[in-house]
Image (cartoon, rainbow, N blue to C red):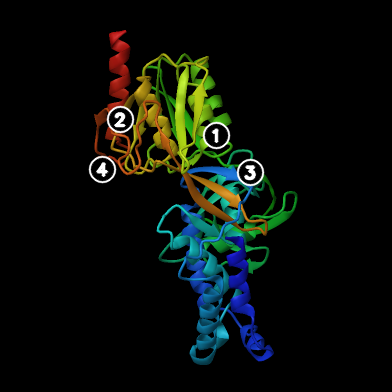
Amino acid sequence: MSSLSFSMIGGVTDMTDQNMERKRRGGFSLGVLAGALAAVLIICGAAGLWRVFSDIRGGDYTSANVSESDVNEKLDQINSLIEDYYLYEDDIDEDALIDGIYSGYAAALGDPYTEYYGEEETDALYESTSGEFSGIGATMSQSLDSGEITVSNVYQDSPAENAGMKQGDIIYEVDGRSVSGYDLETVVSWIKGEQGTDVTLNVLRNGEEVELTATRDIIEVQTVSSEMKDGQIGYIAVSEFDSVTYDQFKSSLDELESQGMQGLIVDLRGNPGGSLTTVTDMLNLLLPEGTIVSIRDKYGNTEEIACDGKNEFTKPLAVLVNQYSASASEIFSGAIQDYGTGTIVGMTTYGKGVVQQLMDLGDGTCLKVTIAEYYTPSGRSINGTGVEPDVEVKYENDEDNPEADNQLDKALEVVRGELEQE
């Protein structure tokens, strides 16, 4: 497979000096196309269930009817036609053309979860799945109407808080550069940077200009939040399964236990998935001894991940899910359901029962490829079907009470009902 990829590069870049000069002139139209693709990759990158893998085995996927030379010849032909006739020649971005070959090659498999990531997308992907980045510790949003970038949350004890940043601040300059006309992703990239370096932010606060200087540091994304509900029922919401999530989950669980928790709700609604290691480690804090999940690859090889049962959770438990709970969320809810450790409440989950590996291509890029299907402890495959809740509850939006949550109310009712029966 790698030999074909390198042949493709040669086919595109083997040009006369005159053609090479043409290619050096610009890069807009195709760059915009590549940028749109990159945005999709970044949005989808953390979703699902993934593992990290770096040992790449080669292979040749040219068919019996199409040789590598045929592919090179056709690419040369397409390239020549573009150079001779394409109207916006000055806007051609050669790097975008090359990346487009790799992206298209992976996309042609027809698998929505197998994707090629360029260098920038790879950096963003690994950052998002690690749950850590070097920045100032604030979240921001951008108005679709005005384009204003507003601080929506400031992490406690973060560089942003230490610099005096407040929720509601409107950012208008970063290191003397106006943010006007730039999208949120670009502005955030200016604010992030190497640990220990300073960034100066000019903000509007209640109509007044305020200058803040923050020293960038390693920020841990909060993927877990928790609180004690009435009746000593603990509540833990998990937004995704990143590398940092296990410690956050365990800390929340221990804190709720220390407060005298009598029952627990784990909220996985909208959780797109994440690390296989993280979700199985978390389940090891709840399940009895036995299989957590089994994984079967294309060769029929099966790997079982087991729980030692030393931390079995025996109090009333409900797990909240919805149609956007996917992959690792489904491993979690499926295992809880199979063992009868808790009650699944909400709507049928997404139905992504396959595993991807992130494969390092050695040049700062990577391939996320589907490598196996997983099965719940009872041997169920949920791919395409999802986990059906034990108690089905469709979310109802209450315009008169935006804080109302009928799905959470039902989960609380389930846990309280079990407590009353004890």
Q: Which tag is nearer the camera, tag 3 or tag 2?
A: 2
- Work out whether mark 1 precedes mark 2 in sequence or the reverse, and give the earlier one: 1
Q: Please give the residue where the numbered disc 1 appears in the rendered image.
A: 277
Neighbour class for label 1 at 10 Å: few (<14), some, many (≥20)? some
Asked whether the beta carbons under mark 3 and mark 4 sit within 8 Å of each other, the answer is no
Q: CA distance from mark 1 to mark 4?
A: 35 Å
- Work out whether mark 1 precedes mark 3 in sequence or the reverse, and give the earlier one: 3
Neighbour class for label 3 at 10 Å: few (<14), some, many (≥20)? some
Residue lying furthest right in this view?
A: 196
Q: Please give the residue where the numbered disc 2 appears in the rendered image.
A: 345
Neighbour class for label 2 at 10 Å: few (<14), some, many (≥20)? many
Q: Which tag is nearer the camera, tag 1 or tag 4?
A: 1
Front residue of 52/4: it is 4
Q: Give the residue type at disc 3.
A: Ile
Per the image, label 3 sits on a secondary structure element best described as: strand
**At which x and y percent is residue 233?**
39, 20
Q: CA distance from mark 3 to mark 2?
A: 33 Å
Q: CA distance from mark 3 to mark 4?
A: 34 Å
Q: Is residue 235 visible?
A: yes
Per the image, label 4 sits on a secondary structure element best described as: loop
- Work out whether mark 3 precedes mark 2 in sequence or the reverse, and give the earlier one: 3
Q: Please give the residue where the numbered disc 4 appears in the rendered image.
A: 397
